């Protein structure tokens, strides 16, 4: 189950919402972006709550207390504390993240992108790009992480083992 989140006036980073991209050789291409959310943003508390509730629904035996259980991760991260896969603090690598949370969103389905009048927006319009400010409607969902680091929805079956060639 997922929880709907509305983020108003957040800055996009690493925008790939018109063309799917794979960041791993042989990986599935996905539409993605990172939203930069200041720590004093009025929608941040609701986003945190939505992600925690999605975790509680997906993993009820692990999410018993008020805090995030050890060993679980979330797409919504405090960039002043969270590290990348190399162990570097996100805000030290990207100064735009200092004093902010980031929300990494991705999907295999193309997102619906519209303007204020709800008319469709395309890449050629040139109004959506990394660094611009947007209103974003997202779904927070619990997921598991396999040992090979590919995410999959909670409760979905494990992938088939690779067949040797």
Image (cartoon, grey):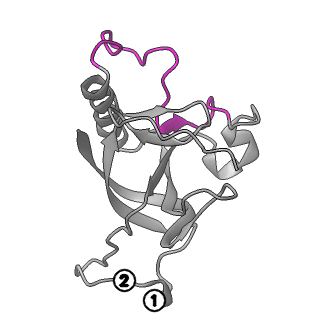
Q: Is residue 100 magenta?
A: no
Q: Tell me the SS state at disc 1.
A: helix
Q: Within the image, what quadrant is residue 48 found in?
A: top left
Residue at 25% from the left image edge and 42% from the top image edge: 2
Cβ–Cβ under 8 Å for marks 2 and 1? yes
Q: Position of residue 122 (x, y in %)?
A: 41, 85
* Quarter-of-image position of residue 82: top right
Q: Which mark is residue 125?
A: 1
Category of crowding for the residue at label 1, using alpha-carbon neighbours closer than 10 angstroms: few (below 14), some (14–19), many (at least 20): few
Instruction: Give coordinates of residue 13: x percent, y percent.
Output: 57, 60
Residue 150 lies, in percent from the top left, at: 55, 42
What separation in Å lies between label 2 and label 1 (alpha carbons)?
Answer: 6 Å
Assign the magenta stretch its main secondary structure.
loop
Asked if 106 appears above or below 15 in the picture, the reply is: above
Task: Indicate the quadrant containing the N terminus: top left, top right, bottom left or bottom right.
Answer: top left
**Span shown in magenta:** 60-83
- Among all residues in the image, which is located at the extreme top? 65
The reply, left or right, for residue 92 in relation to residue 14 is right
Residue designated by label 2: 121
The residue lying toward the viewer, choosing from 30 and 45, is 30
Q: Position of residue 73 (x, y in %)?
A: 50, 29
């Amino acid at each position: 189950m997922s929880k709907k989140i509305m983020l108003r006036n957040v800055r996009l980073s690493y925008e790939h919402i018109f063309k799917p991209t794979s960041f791993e050789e042989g990986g599935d291409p996905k539409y993605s972006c990172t939203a930069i959310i200041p720590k004093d943003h009025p929608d941040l508390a609701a986003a945190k709550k939505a992600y925690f509730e999605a975790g509680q629904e997906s993993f009820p035996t692990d999410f018993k207390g008020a805090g995030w259980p050890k060993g679980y991760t979330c797409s919504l991260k405090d960039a002043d504390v969270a590290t990348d896969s190399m162990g570097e603090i996100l805000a030290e690598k990207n100064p735009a993240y200092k004093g902010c949370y980031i929300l990494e969103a991705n999907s295999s389905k193309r997102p619906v992108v519209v303007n204020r009048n709800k008319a469709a927006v395309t890449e050629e319009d040139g109004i959506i790009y990394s660094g611009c400010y947007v209103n974003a409607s997202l779904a927070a969902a619990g997921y598991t992480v396999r040992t090979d680091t590919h995410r999959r929805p909670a409760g979905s079956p494990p992938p088939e083992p690779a067949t040797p060639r």
